[in-house]
Image (cartoon, helix red, strand yellow):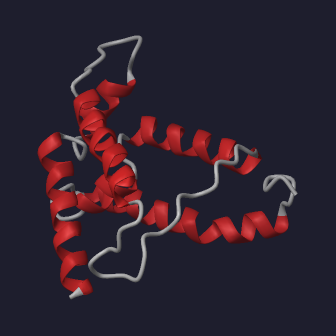
Amino acid sequence: MRLLFSLFSGLLFGAGLFISGMTDTTKVQGWLDIFGAWDPTLAFVLGGAIIPMFFAWRLSTGRRPVTAAQFPPPPPVKIDRRLAIGSLLFGAGWGLAGLCPGPAIASLGYGGVFHWVFFGAMLVGMGLTPYILRNFPRLSGA
């Protein structure tokens, strides 16, 4: 049952990214280009994600999910060097490529070679992160 819910959720998420334009790199770069040809339409996509989740987290308090023993706890709010560096790298990659992880995966089936190259680079970056944090402790704030 859990696998079925996961499949449905992933398909719904991918469809939402495609329909909203989040997999269109030029649209995303237009959203991020606030000093140029700014395209504000993705603000509705972000609001359409944040507002319902605000209420979903409030309503989930004291309830049990259908496919698990409990809801995961909210992550701790800790702004440190790792978060700042990760945010800068994420933002730079998003601005340069017009993709972030969710839309990158959702667009693999139709996006062409660029999307596969981005996806490969993303996987390499994810794989190298533990090595970098282990061997460069100053980056991790340790």
Residue located at (21% from left, 77% from top): 5
Q: Which residue is found at the position 39% from the left and 42% from the top?
A: 97
Q: Nearer the viewer, residue 77 or 121?
A: 77
Q: State the residue in front, 58 or 91.
A: 58
Is 74 above or below relative to 95? below
Q: Position of residue 102 (x, y in %)?
A: 33, 56
In the rendered image, residue 130, in percent from the top left (x then y), is placed at 69, 70
Q: Left or right: 75 with respect to 33?
A: right
- Asked if residue 45 lies left or right of residue 100, the reply is left
Q: Residue furthest top?
A: 35
- Residue situated in front as seen by the camera: 56 or 86: 56
Among the 4 quarters of the image, the one containing residue 96: top left
x%, y% of residue 69? 41, 83
Residue at horizontal 62 percent and vertical 48 percent from the top: 86
Q: State which quarter of the image contains the C terminus.
A: bottom right
Whether residue 114 appears in this view of the structure is no
Q: Is residue 82 left or right of residue 136?
A: left
Between 114 and 124, the one nearer to me in the picture: 124
Query: Which quadrant, please, contains the N terminus?
Result: bottom left
